[in-house]
Image (cartoon, rainbow, N blue to C red):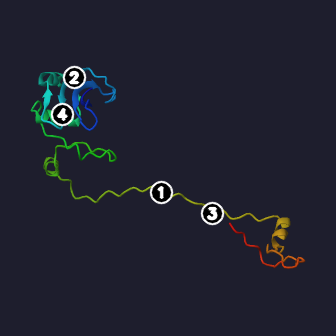
Amino acid sequence: MLKIRLQRVGRIHEPAFRVVLTDSKNSTKSGRFTEILGSYDPRKSVDSIDADRVKHWLAQGAIPTDTVHNLLVTHKIIEGKKINVSAISKKAPAEPAVAETKEEVSASTPAPAEEAPAPVEQAPEPVVEEVAPEPAPEAEVKAEEAPVAESTPEPEAPVAQEEGASNEPEEVVQ
């Protein structure tokens, strides 16, 4: 599919663009294009677009990007409204452009008869089955009934101390 898009050609901090015709699969920075259709400098009011070639390629089925569409509308090469490019969020899914407003839709479609709202279907909750523990064999039961000794440390027997040694742990100086 052919697209009419902008290709940046300016220096660092000095943007300038070419209006080019390219395949939509080509990257914007690849440098591959079919035809140069004009130039656009956003810092100056110097725009030169070949209107005849743009109209020719639009007739052949080329699709302009939103920014190029706005540029073509500004230069009155095509008719239509500008597209709000700054409001498009890349994170949120794009809503389809609908020309009809709510009033036009309600006027064009007959009002439905008074009906109860359709019930919202909910996914059935998963059934959790409780499983009773199986009785243990008698040998295991006797082992379980035996008192379990708590694992408390036994006091150590006093160790014979050398003269001048204390019972307190030594402090480590770092």
* Precedes in sequence: disc 2 or disc 3: 2
Q: Toward the viewer: 101 or 107?
A: 101
Residue type at the position of mark 4? Asp
Residue lying at 26% horizontally and 20% vertically, measured from the top left: 34
Disc nearer the start of the sequence (1/4): 4
Foreground disc of the pair 2, 4: 4
Kindly identify the amino acid type of the residue bearing the numbered disc 3.
Answer: Glu
Instruction: Please name the residue that numbered disc 2 is placed on.
Output: 36
- Upstream in the sequence, badge 3 or badge 4? 4
Q: Give the residue at mark 4.
A: 41
Tell me, for residue 130, which label it has, or none: 3
Disc 3 packing (10 Å; few <14; some 14–19; many ≥20): few
Label 1 residue SS: loop
Quadrant where the C terminus is found in the figure: bottom right
Q: Distance between the residues labelled 1 and 3?
A: 18 Å
The first of marks 1 and 2 along the sequence is 2
